[in-house]
Amino acid sequence: MPSYPTIPALRSGLDAQLGAMTDFTRRTSDAMRKFNELHLQYAQQVMQDVTDASRAIINCSDPFQAAAALASCSKPATEHLLNYQQQVFGVLSGVQLELGRSAEAFVPHAVSAAGAERSHAGNGSRYTPS
């Protein structure tokens, strides 16, 4: 295995970047999992609403009665859609907040690592393989 130069300041900066990217990836994966759960739940609700509306229409003997039955079935579907939208916005705002906090936690590490790299380069030091 080839030997690469090791600079503690550089290593610290790379570790901080790797930690930040790992945290961002974990939070993004959690958000995608939440979105998948919401989509599945909403799809199940839509299928149930369609089934209920179909049953209501099939059980009607009068065309005017079918229109009233269909109108009565639209209220639960609308409520499910509004609930879904609220949950999606909740996940989005939560992810935005979490990613912002992660970025705020990463910035001090990145600044200190960059300062250490700059001071190491300013010393005229040579890279030495470890």
Image (cartoon, grey):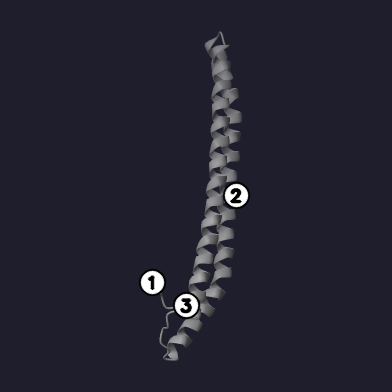
Q: Which residue is mark 2?
A: 90
Q: Residues within 10 Å of mark 2 (few under 14, many from 20)?
A: few
Instruction: Tell me where residue 68 sits by quadrant.
Output: top right
Residue 10, numbered circle: 3
- Which badge, 2 or 1, comes first in the chain's sequence? 1
Q: Secondary structure at mark 1?
A: loop
Q: Position of residue 58 (x, y in %)?
A: 54, 13
Tell me how far mark 2 sits from mark 1, CA to CA. Answer: 49 Å
Query: Which mark is in front, 2 or 3?
Result: 3
- Which badge, 3 or 1, comes first in the chain's sequence? 1
24 versus 82 height, above or below: below
Residue ID at (55%, 50%): 31
Q: Which residue is mark 1?
A: 2
Residue 130 in the figure: left or right of residue 23? left
Tell me how far mark 2 sits from mark 3, CA to CA. Answer: 39 Å
Residue extending farthest to the front is 1
Instruction: Tell me where residue 60 sits by quadrant.
Output: top right
Residue extending farthest to the left is 2
Residue ID at (58%, 26%): 48
What's the residue type where badge 1 is placed? Pro
Tell me how far mark 3 sits from mark 1, CA to CA. Answer: 18 Å
Q: Secondary structure at mark 3?
A: helix
